[in-house]
Image (cartoon, rainbow, N blue to C red):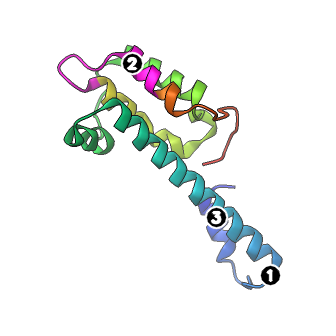
Amino acid sequence: MQLHTAAKALLAEGSSESSEEYQEIALQIRSILYNRHYLDDLISRIVSAAVSDPENRQLVLTTRPTAVHQPECHHRLVHSFNRHCFNFSKNSYAMKYGAVLANLCDLGDSGMDPEKLEDVIRSQCVGLDPSLGDIV
């Protein structure tokens, strides 16, 4: 269930906080928010492991590029993230982090080494099951 759908159901007329349905929807919302926080933290850990300078880390996390300047690198990172972390097509919330992957590729004069970045992604996503869908 998507967050907006769960919230809408929770706010529907006649929902009582003590009802079983209300409790189930509230639990779903907490689960969605927990998973989103987990993904936000995972992305921060990936960026921290790849970028040593705090100012550059902040730029990577907050800048929204107008174009992908290193398309081959971006392609590799998206596929690595899909294979080892979360599949973008199954987790719509993760889509917003495509920009972070593009920023990692663009960092520095000629960008960062895609192989090193893929290693960072693999190491930060050990133990995750990317086949799970719609968890964020």
Residue 27 falls in image quadrant: bottom right
Identified by mark 3, the residue type is: Ile
Q: Does the residue at mark 3 contact the one at mark 1 (Cβ under 8 Å)?
A: no
Pointer 2 residue: 116
- In the picture, measured across the screen, residue 91 lies left or right of residue 50, that is right
Identified by mark 2, the residue type is: Lys
Mark 3 or mark 1: name the one nearer the start of the chain. Answer: 1
User: Dot 1: what SS?
Assistant: loop
In the displayed structure, would residue 26 be above or below residue 44? below
Q: What residue range appears in magenta?
A: 106-120
Mark 2 or mark 3: name the one nearer the start of the chain. Answer: 3
On the image, the x and y values in percent for residue 115 come to: 41, 14
Residue located 26% across and 44% down the image: 58
Pointer 1 residue: 19
Crowdedness of circle 1 by 10 Å Cα count: few (<14), some, many (20+)?
Answer: few
**Residue 117 colored magenta?**
yes
Pointer 3 residue: 29
